[in-house]
Image (spheres, coloured by chain):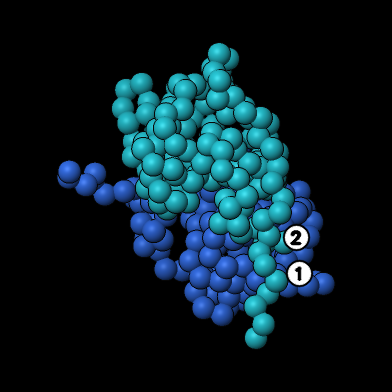
Chain colours: A blue, B cyan
Amino acid sequence: MQPINLNDCLDQFTEHWSPRIIAALNGQEVKLAKFQGAFDWHSHEREDELFLVVHGEFTMEFRDRSVRLREGELIVVPQGVEHRPVAEQECHVLLFEPAGLINTGNASDSDKTNAATWISNCRTSPPRKS
Amino acid sequence: MQPINLNDCLDQFTEHWSPRIIAALNGQEVKLAKFQGAFDWHSHEREDELFLVVHGEFTMEFRDRSVRLREGELIVVPQGVEHRPVAEQECHVLLFEPAGLINTGNASDSDKTNAATWISNCRTSPPRKS
């Protein structure tokens, strides 16, 4: 049981739309992802999905509205609801969702489908000397 | 589906060790809590618990070690592991755990047992005018 430092984890990868798993608990996974540009429209048939903005801002588009999310804000997209995140500038997001969720959900033709991989070398540096 | 602003949620309550539920998904709950002082030793028999520091710092004590957690760091305490958070100064923490988890777990004599209540008036203010 070591502390997991979000910024240290984010320093470990550069790809957009390619989530990294940083923790697992109770059949759920905690992931970090970098958003830039527009993702594909998709939904997750049986899973809700939580997005928490760590750095930056993005818009979560729905078919009938858009919601702006800023640093320190989260949204839960319920199962079955079509959505598309769009970020003008790179945005870093924490995701909380059932283990094994595919990022593009039911968008089977998407070229942005990425199986999330684990990242493990993002622990805090040794304790500061007093 | 509205954005939930963590700071706005934190402004809605002052009590320590009294988690507020801010979101629910996939049988899990997302809570915010304010820590100050020492909690009671306890474990959760069947549930893992995630703590993410939003503001401040705290120490998660285990029976064989202590782990310091700073802003932007998280830890997962596995089911069955005894633990006790300790914060010298007020610390704000986001929790991910199964719905209905009791904060003091198996510590049935604790006076810090609090059933988590929902908080709902912590949405972002109206969008900025362009």
Residue at (50% x, 61% y) in the render:
A54
Q: What quarter of the picture does the C terminus of chain A occupy? A: top left
Would you say B86 lies left or right of B8 here? left
Q: Amino acid at mark 1?
A: Phe
Q: Which of A63 and A74 lies nearest the eye of the viewer?
A: A74
Q: What quarter of the picture does the N terminus of chain A occupy? A: top left
Residue B123 x/y as whole percent: 68, 60
Would you say B28 lies left or right of B86 here? right
Dot 1: few (<14), some (14–19), or many (≥20) neighbours within 10 Å?
some
Local SS, label 1: loop
Q: Confirm or deny contact between disc 2 and disc 1 (CB under 8 A).
A: yes
Dot 2: few (<14), some (14–19), or many (≥20) neighbours within 10 Å?
few
Q: Residue furthest bottom?
A: B130
Residue identified by numbered label 2: B1
Q: Alpha-carbon distance for marks 2 and 1?
A: 10 Å
Residue at (72% x, 66% y) in the render:
A83
Residue identified by numbered label 1: A62
Q: Could you tell me how many numbered marks the image carries?
A: 2
Residue A125 x/y as whole percent: 26, 49
Residue B91 x/y as whole percent: 44, 44
Q: Which of B76 and B59 lies nearest the eye of the viewer?
A: B59
Local SS, label 2: loop
